[in-house]
Amino acid sequence: MDVVHSTGLREAKKAATRSALARAVLRLSTRAGIDHVTIDAVAAEANVSVRTFHNYFSGKEDALLHFVSSLFDTIVERIEARPSDESFFCSVRTALISAATSPEVGEPSEIVALLRLLDTDPGLTARSRDMELGDTVEARLAELCAQRGQPAHTLYPRLVLHNAITTIRVTLEFWVTHHDDTPGTTVELATMLESAFDQLASGMSQPIPPMNIPPMNDLADPSPEEL
């Protein structure tokens, strides 16, 4: 029993170190751009040796892709943990909002920076495609739909997932551009995300009245087009 417990602690420590290194790469990339990030700087940021970094990753790109993979796993696990009698849209909505506002997942600015890197860095883009993360996520969610007695291999779950991800991304980018780092901003972000999903659920033909989101910088009274 002690051996099992000791092994579990070691694995948990390794997972924590791997996550800390990946987050360090992402933080530094957010500040200066990935091209200017060095392994020495990452090691210092995570308070470990360069050798320790190389025990976990072959380079900074590997660390970022680990973060991406972990992020996808977290999102899918949160969707899978939702009640089986809940609609697929509500499960995806709740899970994504929960992940986007969780400090354990990452700061909004970090997530936005990561998504932009995946779009603009050719090496990261190619390697992320090779990992087939999107296909893996879709397969797991198709299995979830089947378990719930819902059609799995139809257009609907894919529309829900990809529209939900786009909604999260656009809202986070909007948030990062306008928020002012004042206390309580996590609550305000959750409110903005809920409002964005309300708009998605109602359709895009007409704007809906925004929820009561506290003023942020120049955004005291956001226009419907911005939401």
Image (cartoon, rainbow, N blue to C red):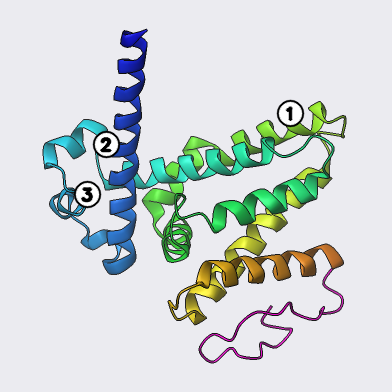
Determine the CA span between mark 1 and mark 2.
31 Å
What residue would you read off at disc 1?
143
Determine contact: label 1, label 2, CB under 8 Å: no
Q: Nearer the viewer, residue 141 or 187?
A: 187
Name the residue rendered at 69%, 52% in the picture. 94
Location of residue 28 in the rendering, given as x and y in whole percent from the top left corner: 27, 60
Determine the CA span between mark 1 and mark 3.
37 Å
* Label placed on residue 46: 3
Name the residue rendered at 81%, 34% in the picture. 153
Q: Nearer the viewer, residue 99 or 167?
A: 99
Determine the CA span between mark 3 and mark 2.
14 Å
Is 205 magenta? The answer is yes
- Mark 1 falls on what kind of element? helix
Res 77 → quadrant? top right
Magenta stretch: helix, strand or loop mostly: loop
Label 3 or label 2, whichever comes before in sequence order: 3
Kind of residue at disc 3: Ala
Kind of residue at disc 1: Glu
Name the residue rendered at 29%, 68% in the picture. 31
Label 1 or label 2, whichever comes before in sequence order: 2
Q: Is residue 188 left or right of residue 194?
A: left
Q: Which residues are magenta?
A: 203-227
Image: 153 above or below 33: above
* Label placed on residue 57: 2
How many C-alpha atoms fall within 10 Å of the one at disc 3: few (<14), some, or many (≥20)? some
